Image (cartoon, helix red, strand yellow):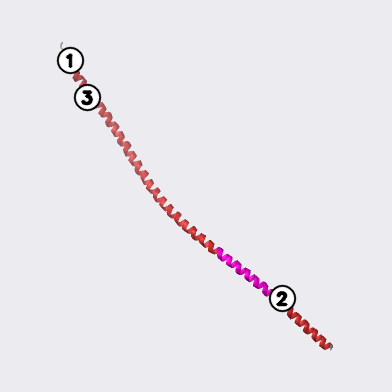
């Protein structure tokens, strides 16, 4: 009987150890499954975040392209403006030269007109002197 008891006790301990091992294994498996579910959830969230970031990057790329196009247009317009300013400066210089020439021509014309008026007044004076009876 002692042999039976010790062998029974040994079997009971063996069964209890197996049950404990099975329970520990079950707990470990449950922990692994929970962690895997949590990891899957986090991966899903990260995937959604990546898609959102992708949309933002695409939108920023379009904005950058529009800004680049606007900047290129602005540079083109500025170059045209610079060319117009150069043209206007040259035209202003030409106009200033022409105004000076006109002022000089006007002065000469005024001088000639004054000489003509003076001569005409003398002529009228001479005619009047010759028509007056002395």
Q: Quadrant of the C terminus?
A: top left
Residue positioned 48% across, 59% down in the render:
61
Image check: 1 left or right of 42? right
Q: Which residues are magenta?
A: 25-49
Q: CA distance from mark 1 to mark 3?
A: 20 Å
Residue 89 picture quarter: top left
Estimate the x, y position of residue 42 in percent, counting from the top left. Answer: 60, 66
| Residue corresponding to mark 3 | 116
Q: Quadrant of the N terminus?
A: bottom right
Residue positioned 33% across, 41% down in the render:
91
> Given contact means CB atoms under 8 Å apart, are the residues at marks 1 and 2 in contact?
no
Main SS of the magenta part reads: helix
* SS class, disc 2: helix
Above or below for 28 versus 66: below
Q: Is residue 38 magenta?
A: yes
Q: Is residue 44 magenta?
A: yes
Q: CA distance from mark 1 to mark 2?
A: 150 Å
Sequence order check, earlier mark of 1 and 2: 2
| Residue corresponding to mark 1 | 129
């Amino acid at each position: 009987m002692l042999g039976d008891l010790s062998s029974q006790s040994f079997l009971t301990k063996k069964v209890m150890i197996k049950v404990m091992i099975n329970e520990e294994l079950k707990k470990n498996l449950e922990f692994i499954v929970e962690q895997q579910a949590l990891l899957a959830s986090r991966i899903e969230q990260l995937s959604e975040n990546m898609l959102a970031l992708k949309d933002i990057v695409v939108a920023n790329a379009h904005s950058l392209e529009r800004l680049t196009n606007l900047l290129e247009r602005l540079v083109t317009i500025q170059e045209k403006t610079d060319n117009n300013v150069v043209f206007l400066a040259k035209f202003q210089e030409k106009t200033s030269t022409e105004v000076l020439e006109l002022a000089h021509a006007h002065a000469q014309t005024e001088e000639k007109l004054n000489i003509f008026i003076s001569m005409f007044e003398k002529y009228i004076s001479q005619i009047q002197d010759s028509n007056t009876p002395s």
